[in-house]
Image: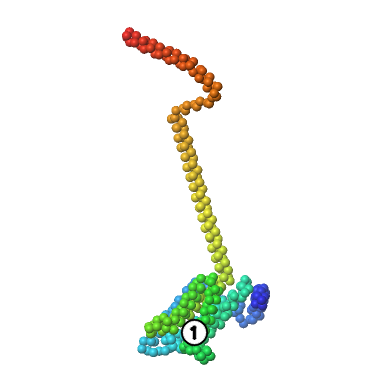
């Protein structure tokens, strides 16, 4: 609770303190006559963070050149010259100084990250304190790269527990446990920056590989190759760890400037516009399909109507069905049947007589012709 209340007070008083500091700087600039106003406009600590792509590329290429130079110097010093100052595994050599410098560089990046992250308004739980602990651990590790205090710690733990784990066993166990927990916590902290997370995991893999080589679990019978892989793997892991810390510092600096928020808004607007265009295309396609369906339905209905009309014209008229009659009407019909038969027979006789008379007339005309 004390940490949260202190956090709230600091966030509320930041603006007023900044105003007071600016006013004091203006007063000092006006009072001192021996200096110009630009003397108080020096770069801040956050300007050390490589934000621009050119500076980032120069930093990466510089680290790669340093690693390549150390490897070349080690090969040159080991080929019959026995110059210990340039060999990788020798204490007090150039490689140990470079390793200490890279760890101090990583500690400086962690400290800058802490100085920026502690001003975040929504971090009331104080998660930014992990960078302060990381900076302290990196400083201790950088000291162990040049002075062998870790060997004394290993001997002390060996005498205290009466368990012999070798010249580096207790040191690797304790340092590996603490560093492993710190790396897990840092991975959780940098999870939003994918590049820093990937570099941190790569550095962890390099440390594990170098430890396995030192314990003769991997490359046990390779001699100089195993020694070179162990020593150079530690250096590359230090450099990768420093890259991870500074890349995360760059991410935090850009986040404090609002760059990531603007990018997220532009990305969201672009996705929304893309979604709208897709929906518009889908609606246009559906409208075109609906028009095609309606036109097809009209054509089919017109063709069916034409077929029905043609069928009605081709079919003969249907015989009308006789309505049902009652029994009384049926009996009357039966009584009237002989009458209708006699009338039909008379009509038939008249029709035959007419036909015969027509034939006789035709024959007489032929005879006369």
Residue at 57% across / 70% down in the picture?
A: 255
Where is residue 212? Give x, y as percent: 44, 81
Q: Quadrant of residue 236?
A: bottom left
Residue at 41% across / 81% down in the picture?
A: 218
Extreme residue in the bottom direction: 159
Q: Which residue is mark 1?
A: 172
Q: What colour scheme does the image use?
A: rainbow
Where is residue 249? Give x, y as percent: 54, 75
Could you classify mark 1 by the number of other residues whose Cα lies within 10 Å: few (under 14), some (14-19), or many (20 or more)?
A: some
Q: Could you say which is closer to the camera, residue 300 or residue 288?
A: 300
Q: Is residue 14 left or right of residue 244?
A: right
The quarter of the picture where the N terminus appears is bottom right
Residue 110: in sight, yes or no?
Answer: yes
Residue at 36% across / 87% down in the picture?
A: 79
Q: Secondary structure at mark 1?
A: helix
Where is residue 269? Give x, y as percent: 55, 60
Residue 62: in sight, yes or no?
Answer: no
Q: Is residue 11 above or below residue 172?
A: above
Q: Quadrant of residue 26?
A: bottom right
Residue at 52% across / 58% down in the picture?
A: 274
Q: Is residue 78 left or right of residue 138?
A: left
Q: Is residue 250 above or below residue 331?
A: below
Where is residue 283? Give x, y as percent: 52, 51
Q: Is residue 364 left or right of residue 142?
A: left
Q: Could you say which is closer to the camera, residue 165 or residue 205?
A: 165
The quarter of the picture where the C terminus appears is top left
Q: Could you say which is closer to the camera, residue 18 or residue 256?
A: 256
Q: Is residue 348 above or below residue 31?
A: above
Total numbered labels placed on residues in the image: 1
Q: Could you say which is closer to the camera, residue 161 or residue 74?
A: 161
């Amino acid at each position: 609770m004390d940490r949260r209340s202190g956090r709230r007070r600091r966030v509320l008083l930041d603006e007023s303190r900044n105003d007071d500091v600016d006013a004091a700087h203006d007063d000092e600039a006006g009072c001192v006559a021996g200096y110009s106003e630009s003397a108080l406009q020096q770069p801040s600590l956050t300007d050390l963070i490589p934000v621009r792509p050119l500076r980032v590329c120069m930093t990466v290429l510089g680290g790669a050149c340093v690693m390549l130079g150390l490897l070349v110097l080690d090969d040159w010093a080991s080929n019959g010259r026995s110059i210990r100052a340039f060999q990788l595994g020798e204490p007090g050599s150039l490689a140990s100084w470079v390793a200490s410098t890279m760890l101090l560089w990583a500690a400086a990046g962690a400290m800058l990250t802490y100085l920026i992250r502690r001003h975040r308004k929504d971090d009331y739980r104080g998660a930014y304190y992990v960078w302060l602990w990381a900076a302290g651990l990196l400083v201790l590790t950088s000291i162990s790269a040049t002075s062998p205090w870790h060997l004394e710690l290993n001997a002390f733990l060996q005498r205290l527990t009466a368990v012999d784990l070798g010249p580096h066993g207790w040191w690797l166990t304790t340092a590996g446990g603490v560093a492993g927990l710190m790396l897990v916590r840092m991975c959780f902290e940098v999870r939003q920056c994918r590049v820093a997370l990937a570099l941190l995991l790569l550095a962890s893999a390099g440390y594990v590989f170098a430890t396995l080589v030192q314990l003769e679990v991997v490359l046990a019978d390779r001699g100089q190759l195993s020694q070179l892989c162990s020593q150079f793997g530690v250096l590359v892991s230090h450099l990768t760890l420093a890259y991870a810390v500074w890349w995360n510092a760059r991410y935090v600096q850009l986040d404090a400037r609002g760059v990531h928020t603007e990018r997220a808004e532009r990305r969201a607007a672009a996705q929304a516009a893309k979604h709208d265009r897709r929906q518009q295309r889908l609606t246009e396609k559906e409208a075109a399909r609906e028009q095609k369906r309606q036109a097809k339905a009209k054509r089919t209905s017109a063709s069916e109507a034409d077929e029905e009309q043609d069928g009605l014209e081709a079919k003969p008229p249907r015989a009308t069905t006789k309505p049902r009659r009652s029994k009384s009407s049926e009996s009357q019909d039966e009584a009237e049947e002989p009458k209708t038969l006699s009338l039909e027979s008379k009509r038939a006789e008249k029709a035959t007589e007419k036909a015969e008379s027509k034939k006789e007339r035709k024959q007489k005309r032929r005879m006369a012709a």
